[in-house]
Amino acid sequence: MHIPEHYLSPQTCAVMTAAMLPVWGHAMKKVKLDVSKEKMPLLGVGAAFSFLGMMFNVPLPGGTTGHAVGGTLIAILLGPEAACLAVTIALLIQALLFGDGGILAFGANCFNMAFVLPYAGYFVYRLIADRISSEKGRYMGAAVGSYVGINVAALCAAIEFGIQPALFHDSMGQALYCPYGLSVSIPAMMAGHLTLFGLAEVIFTTAIVAFVGKAAPGMIQDAKSRKSANTPVYILLAVLICAVPLGLLAEGTAWGEWGADEIAEVVSGGKVLGYTPAGMAEGFEWSTLFPDYSVAGLPDAFGYILSAIIGVALAIILFRLISAAMKEKVNYAK
């Protein structure tokens, strides 16, 4: 679901980034009010879960891959505003260091995965959990909410892809950016997310919600227990880091994430494209330190693990630094 560089026009990227500015502003204000200095590092844990979830690629017949995002998971644990900021940081680390998602398309990727996904997923989760006041209700809400969240986000990405050829093309009718219209982009994106990728999101979300509910229930924002021992959560992160090479087993490229050097030969919608859109061939490129989560001189599996360690460490350190800079909230109530 990560939109690469030059699949969206600069105009589209600007509009999507502008749309995210008030969302980020609201999320930061809400988190500043509601999240204490002691709990702020948990946003780093949430960002780490999202970062790792997106490294476990799932294959779809035909060579397409996808992954979980974890936005609804973080919203359940810490609230949708916290999820928005945590997923934003995960996406920023991916784009800057690993080339997963475009720099110019960062606003669009955040709109889909850091805004639409956690808020839609959390809305559905609350609808179910508030009506079935038990562990069963929480798990049902987590499952249905995460499934709805990732599919609404995928639909948004498909629409952003699909409007490009109609809005931006040359005098010969050839697309300047994403060359696939809505009739191709929506079925192509939704086929995977309504099936295996959606299932991956459900499993990832409900499994971690269940684990946290048993091992560190105080981390869940609406839990009755205030038990705050988070050591088991950090152990789970370490286990997931060691397991990330499983994501390498899924061969192929996610739909809509082909490089400019290969898109001309891609078969989508039953046809070979046959040309490289000019905007892709001539656009800005960002050189990353660890392209595609690889490290020069290391086997792919070790590079993947090292990339996971770097991403998780950066997410946790960033929110710990924010926590350290926060002032203690004074309670004036008597």
Image (cartoon, rainbow, N blue to C red):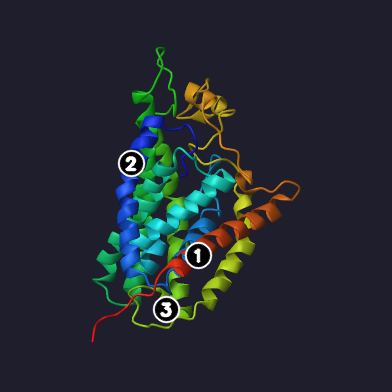
The mark closer to the camera, 2 or 3, is 2
User: Of callouts 3 and 1, which one flags the residue occurring earlier in the amino acid sequence?
Assistant: 3
Residue drawn at (48%, 79%), measured in percent from left and top?
A: 215
Q: What amino acid type is highlighted by mark number 2? A: Ala
Residue 98, relative to residue 231: is it above or below? above
Residue drawn at (63%, 45%), measured in percent from left and top?
A: 289
Give the labeled residue for mark 1.
321
Q: Tell me if label 3 and label 1 are in contact, CB under 8 Å.
A: no
Q: What amino acid type is highlighted by mark number 1? A: Leu
The mark closer to the camera, 3 or 1, is 1
User: Of callouts 2 and 3, which one flags the residue occurring earlier in the amino acid sequence?
Assistant: 2
| Between 296 and 173, the one nearer to me in the picture | 296
The quadrant holding residue 137 is bottom left
Q: CA distance from mark 2 to mark 3?
A: 37 Å
User: Of callouts 1 and 2, which one flags the residue occurring earlier in the amino acid sequence?
Assistant: 2
The quadrant holding residue 263 is top right
| Between 250 and 115, the one nearer to me in the picture | 115
Residue 144 pos. (x, y %): 34, 61
Q: What amino acid type is highlighted by mark number 3? A: Pro
Give the labeled residue for mark 3.
217
Q: Secondary structure at mark 3?
A: helix
Residue 329 pos. (x, y %): 34, 75
Q: Mark 3: give few (<14), some (14-19) or many (20+) Cα within 10 Å.
A: many
- Residue 156 shows in this picture: yes
Residue 177, relative to residue 30: is it above or below? above
